[in-house]
Image: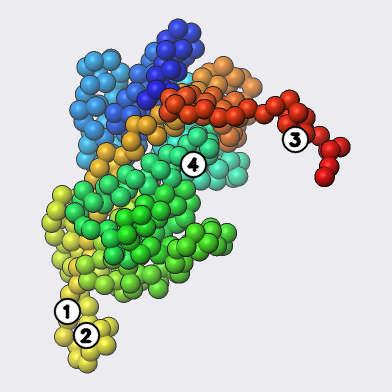
Amino acid sequence: MPVLNSLKVRFAKEKTLKGVKLAACLHVTAETANLARTLKAGGAEVLLCASNPLSTQDEVAAALVKEYGISVFAIHGEDKETYYSHLRAALDFKPNITMDDGADLLSLLHTEYKQQAKNVWGSMEETTTGVIRLKALEKAGKLAVPIIAVNDAKTKNMFDNRYGTGQSTIDGIIRATDILIAGKNVVVAGYGWCGRGFAARARGMGAKVIVTEVDKIKALEAAMDGFQVMPMNEAAKIGDLFCTLTGDKDVLRGEHFKVMKDGAMVANSGHFDVEINIPELKKLAVKVNKNVRNHVDEYVIGIRNKELGIRGNAKNTKSIYLLAEGRLVNLAAAEGHPASVMDMSFATQALASEQVAKNYKKLSKKVYNVSAEIEDWVAELKLSAMGIGIDELTPEQKKYLSSWEIGT
């Protein structure tokens, strides 16, 4: 992670976060550990808790505590009660700055810990789902702290979401199922940056890719990119593998499970486990076989012959396979994004935290974009680390681009 390492060297020299108490609610992975070490090098007192019960790498959590003296509240597979007790521990730490991935920590700050919000200088949000929630808070006039939408930075969503999620989602699905992607009808729910990345990589492995969307522009884009586009009610009948990447709930629900073919596999790579309506899947099931493979649960669904176009009322069954309990398949069944792409995202996180520490008295309670200065710095260092050079504008070119007098 060369960009983050460069930042760590500067932070250690300048101690730009000295005296800052920083609580981060993120996926506890090796890449996140490097972010935590960078923040500590800058002088911050850091506490880390998990943003997802199945994404924690226990050996990383242990190493952060033992080797680097960073407090970590995270256990792989922790139940909901433990998960929220860890979020509360993060807020009991009384941080000046927070980092979030999905806005669970900020939601708790706006409910149980409302009185503490006035002492929080600002927060960074790492993922699409979290930004959606925080912008809803802002729109409702209830946002209590300034937010930097790190997810919306070009150095994050164009790379982390597209290339990181695209590759790691394929990785998680293959590790969990050992299926051949080639020849499969792969249904991609959502054509944002994550959906684009996953769809491209599935097609690259020989899949017949179908995209479902609610956004007219994104649907057009998917069609122009050469993918089939159709409503989920139609796609559900022909899909072999489904993956949701929307940031919304109930993307796959009972009406879709009912028409899916026997052996259909469903996975989620959106932040929360609400994109697949698991309660409706359970309700339809006559039997659930847990862990038929690691991270794969089989839901046996009863179907009547008339649903198959056969006379009579005798019941048959079909199986639908749910991957990673509907949680982030790329982190639950694999290792998440490669370090080289998280390098940019976490460098952006660290620089945004520095910006908040330096300017919090000037910040309003709203959602901010990452500054162009931070974007350029991260991109420049990443290009350098990759050994890539680019051209510079000549003085005449700069003049031409900034003037209106020169025409054809």
The numbered mark, 1 or 4, whose residue comes first in the sequence reads 4
- How far, Cα to Cα, is label 2 from label 3? 68 Å
Q: Position of residue 43 (x, y in %)?
A: 42, 11
Given this view, does label 2 or label 4 mark the residue nearer the observer? 4
The numbered mark, 2 or 4, whose residue comes first in the sequence reads 4
Identify the residue shown where x is 22% and y is 92%. Answer: 311
Secondary element under disc 2, as helix, strand or loop, is: helix
Residue identified by numbered label 3: 401
- How far, Cα to Cα, is label 1 from label 4? 46 Å
- Residue at the far top: name it: 13
- How far, Cα to Cα, is label 2 from label 4? 47 Å
Three-letter amino acid code at the position of disc 4: Met
Three-letter amino acid code at the position of disc 2: Asn
Q: Is residue 298 above or below residue 124?
A: below
Three-letter amino acid code at the position of disc 3: Leu
**In this orientation, does residue 301 appear?**
no
Q: Is residue 389 above or below residue 254?
A: above
**In this orientation, does residue 16 appear?**
yes
Marks counted in the figure total 4
Q: Which mark is residue 316?
A: 1
Residue identified by numbered label 4: 158
- How far, Cα to Cα, is label 4 from label 3? 25 Å
82 horizontally vs 366: left or right = left
Identify the residue shown where x is 24% and y is 45%. Answer: 333
The numbered mark, 4 or 3, whose residue comes first in the sequence reads 4
Secondary element under disc 3, as helix, strand or loop, is: helix
The numbered mark, 2 or 1, whose residue comes first in the sequence reads 2
Q: Which mark is residue 305?
A: 2
Q: Residues within 10 Å of mark 4 (few under 14, many from 20)?
A: some
Q: Residues within 10 Å of mark 3 (few under 14, many from 20)?
A: few
